Image (cartoon, rainbow, N blue to C red):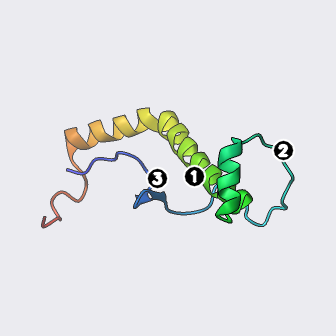
Amino acid sequence: MMRVNYAHCEHRGKAVGNLPFNPAAPKKSANLSINSDLLQQAKQLNINLSQTLEQHLAEIIRQAQRSQWLAENQNALDEYNRRIEKRGAFSDGLRRF
């Protein structure tokens, strides 16, 4: 019996598919406050703060969008799973596994 848990796929912990932002959008300056020790270590290690923030922020946005989508569609997913449990899937007689 096949159940739908969520429609957004993940592969090795990373979201698969489109980025949650337009990478061609122009850059915009932003003032941030950051722990001084973290900033010093990042500079010593030549870590690009803008790139690092964009990467992690994109992942946080993906996770938030996934959670929002699941919350908005949970009733439909539950109803679909109840229907499959009750009636089975159309391919139940065709599968060989």
Label 2 crowd (10 A; few <14 / some 14-19 / many >=20):
few
Label 3 crowd (10 A; few <14 / some 14-19 / many >=20):
some
Name the residue that disc number 2 marks. 31
| Helix, strand or loop at mark 3 | loop
Sequence-wise, the earlier of marks 2 and 1 is 2
Name the residue that disc number 1 marks. 59
Closer to the eye: label 1 or 3: 1
- The residue depicted at 12 percent of the width and 67 percent of the height is 96
Image quadrant in which you'd find residue 64: top right
Total labels: the figure holds: 3
- The residue depicted at 74 percent of the width and 58 percent of the height is 50
Circle 1: residue type:
Glu
Name the residue that disc number 3 marks. 8
Q: Which residue is more in the foreground, 93 or 28?
A: 28
**Above or below — where is 38 with respect to 25?**
above
Q: Which residue is more in the foreground, 29 or 70?
A: 29
Q: CA distance from mark 2 to mark 1?
A: 21 Å
**Above or below — where is 72 with respect to 38?**
above
- The residue depicted at 34 percent of the width and 47 percent of the height is 4
- The residue depicted at 78 percent of the width and 67 percent of the height is 24
Closer to the eye: label 3 or 2: 2
Percent x, y for residue 44?
Answer: 67, 61
